Amino acid sequence: MTSTLSSAEVSRWRAAVGDSRIGEPVAGADLTRLPPDLRAFYQVVGEVSLPDVENGYWIHRPPGPGVDNGQPYVLSDGRPIVVFGSDGGGALFALCGSAVLRLAGGAEVGGVYDEDGATVVAADLREFLALLLRGAGRP
């Protein structure tokens, strides 16, 4: 999988959201274990807090190397996922390949999430970030 998201795009997204809602870039962390688009994102933005958009959206800072963040890492059909965010309703957001999934209503046991509770909400991280901007009333 090649990265479709550039650091320049993330920088423009960061400016549109506003720095008061965004954490500093992730420095000194080993991001190589992350998918390319998340790696590009975290090199410019550490975390995002949008509590006033719909029921709230958060993009979490990645866990440090060797740290288990307690999130699922695979769907029950065997596809690997990387959880990167959540909403105020208790759902999680994860990359699965290039697609962004909303994980809600499924069971998670031992890091495995029930695939029936996973719904595609965006074709890729770029589209997901655009959805957040529109929800925040920004172009």
Image (tube, rainbow, N blue to C red):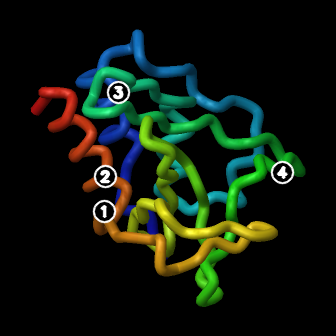
Q: Is residue 113 above or below residue 55?
A: below
Residue 43, quarter of the rendered image = top right
Q: Residues within 10 Å of mark 3 (few under 14, many from 20)?
A: many
Amino acid type for the residue under numbered disc 4: Asp
Pick whichever of labels 2 and 4 is earlier in the sequence.
4
Left or right: 120 in relation to 70 = left
Residue identifier under label 1: 121
> Where is mark 4, residue-wise?
68
Q: Secondary structure at mark 4?
A: loop
Residue position for label 3: 14
Above or below, comparing residue 107 to residue 129 in the picture:
below
Observer-side mark, 2 or 3, equals 2
Q: Given contact means CB atoms under 8 Å apart, are the residues at marks 2 and 1 in contact? A: yes
Instruction: Provide residue 58's location: percent of width, then percent of height.
Output: 47, 34
Determine crowd level at label 1: few under 14, some 14-19, many 20+ residues with C-alpha closer than 10 A: some
Instruction: Please give left or right for residue 120 compared with residue 26 in the image.
Output: left
Callout 2 secondary element? helix
- Mark with earlier residue (4, 1): 4
Q: Is residue 89 left or right of residue 12?
A: right
Q: Position of residue 60 (x, y in %)?
A: 58, 37
User: For the residue marked with disc 1, what is the amino acid?
Assistant: Val
Residue 69 percent across, percent down from the top left: 77, 47
The mark closer to the camera, 2 or 1, is 1
Q: Given the image, on which type of amino acid does mark 2 rest?
A: Phe
Task: State the residue lying farthest toward the right.
Answer: 66
Which one is earlier in the sequence, the residue at label 1 or at label 3? 3
Which label's residue is closer to the chain start, 2 or 1? 1
Taking depth in this image into account, of 59 and 29 the one nearest to the observer is 59
Give the SS element for disc 3.
Answer: helix
